[in-house]
Amino acid sequence: MSASFPPKVWLLAALLSFACATTDARTRSVAAGASIQAAIDQAAAGDIIEIARGHYRENLRVTKALTLLGLGRPTIDGGLVGNTIDVSAERVVIDGLNVRDSGDSLREQNAGIYLKPGAHRAVVRNCTLSYNLFGLWIEKADFVTIENNNITGKRDYRSSQRGNGIQLYNAQHARILGNHISFVRDAIYVDVSHDAVFQHNRLHHSRYGSHYMNSYRNLWEGNDSWMNRGGLALMEVRDQVVRNNRAWANSDHGIMLRTIQDAVVENNIVAGNVQGLFIYDAEYNTLRNNLVVDNLIGVRLWAGSKNNKVEGNDFIANRDQVRYVGARDEPWGDKQGNFWSNYLGWDRDGDGRGDVPYEANDLVDRLSWRYPTVQLLLASPAIQTLRLVGRQFPLLRAPSVVDARPRMRATHDDWRDWLGKTYPGSR
């Protein structure tokens, strides 16, 4: 399974675009103070409209395949009404514009740039989108590329009244690359949108850095999510690849895996969050080679999450390594083992694997979660005796995540660099 696509798919799209381009395309210029919409109306499909630096108070409608190219970053101002730029044609390119001041109707989904159904193969790059309700709304438009844009929302609005930075709805094969998004509701919201690539985006000061719903076969790679409520939320999805990302200092979770199957989550750094990994109703996923460090809770695992392969991860300096709620032990690390910084076992044969199992939780842990005042007694002889009794008499032990032969050394040598990168006020 892979979330990337065969080169032939992208080559075919490029050839179709080239074949449809007209050979007599011309470049039209819009001087400061002139009407961009008038130039759009007069242009033929395939034309390039060069827009001089200036401030243009217009709500643009693009109904043919055109390139809108900003010279010196001109500003398109929607006047706080409707969509600032409305695109309904295929192969439209918007490059180098400041797009701002859309309306604020959540019902109408007002956006800085609205790619409407049929706006396939649109490209939006090198733009600044500011004070729009939604930065980009992309609906039933396939093979779009959204690249190297800076997107901020109506930051004086309450989070629930803002729109999302980039909204994908029923849009297939999108490429969302290198965008910087902040102060919106969700930085990237993905709904019923499959076979997409999200790479090297920076997402912060929003509700969720990314919020997936009902979307399959997507690649989430090399993205940074920090100072959000949640870094990455994957809900009701399948066949995701989530690798080489960094999620830190989020006030709730770094990565949420909820009602998810057949995903690969690998080589990520999850640091300084209240909860590092939140795993709920997750089955048949692979979590490997991740660094989970300095979270209040390293992993919260519950709601029948089982049959997952959890191998080669480093769990370091989390206040609670795992909070597991289940009726039976959950085995992790069957083949490679994981590293646990609070493991107290030994390695007599020197093979780098512990000789006694690591158990993430015991009876005292379960009592302290259920009755928080028990934590006042954690250092008392009675509590230590209770821990010992739980180990000696299996009938009294609580179900736990069990790593049969944990690794003795961490694989991430840079884990100390991530200590202290926490959400303000969370400690």
Image: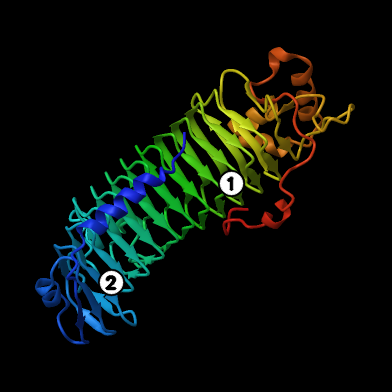
Q: Determine the residue positioned at 13% across, 72% down.
A: 43
Q: Which mark is residue 174?
A: none
Q: Report whether 3 appears left or right of 100.
A: right
- Seen from the viewer's position, the closer of residues 67 and 217 is 67
Horizontal and vertical percent position of residue 215 = 36, 39
- Seen from the viewer's position, the closer of residues 389 and 351 is 351
Specify few, some or many for label 1: CA neighbours under 10 Å numbering under 14, 14-19, or 20 or more: many
Between discs 2 and 1, the one toward the N terminus: 2
Horizontal and vertical percent position of residue 106 = 23, 56
**Residue 165 appears in view:** no
The residue beneath circle 2 is: 100
Figure label count: 2
Q: Residue furthest bottom?
A: 32
- Seen from the viewer's position, the closer of residues 370 and 295 is 295
**Residue 265 appears in view:** yes
Q: Determine the residue positioned at 70% across, 39% down.
A: 376
- The picture quadrant where one finds residue 316 is top right
- The picture quadrant where one finds residue 194 is top left
Whether residue 379 is situated above or below residue 49 in the rendered picture: above
Q: Amino acid at mark 2?
A: Arg
Horizontal and vertical percent position of residue 378 = 74, 36
Callout 2: SS: strand
Q: Amino acid at mark 1?
A: Asn
Q: Report whether 142 appears left or right of 416.
A: left
Q: Residue furthest front?
A: 23
Q: Report whether 337 appears left or right of 209.
A: right
The residue beneath circle 1 is: 268
Callout 1: SS: loop
- Marks 2 and 1, Cα distance to the nearest angstrom? 34 Å
Horizontal and vertical percent position of residue 91 = 23, 59
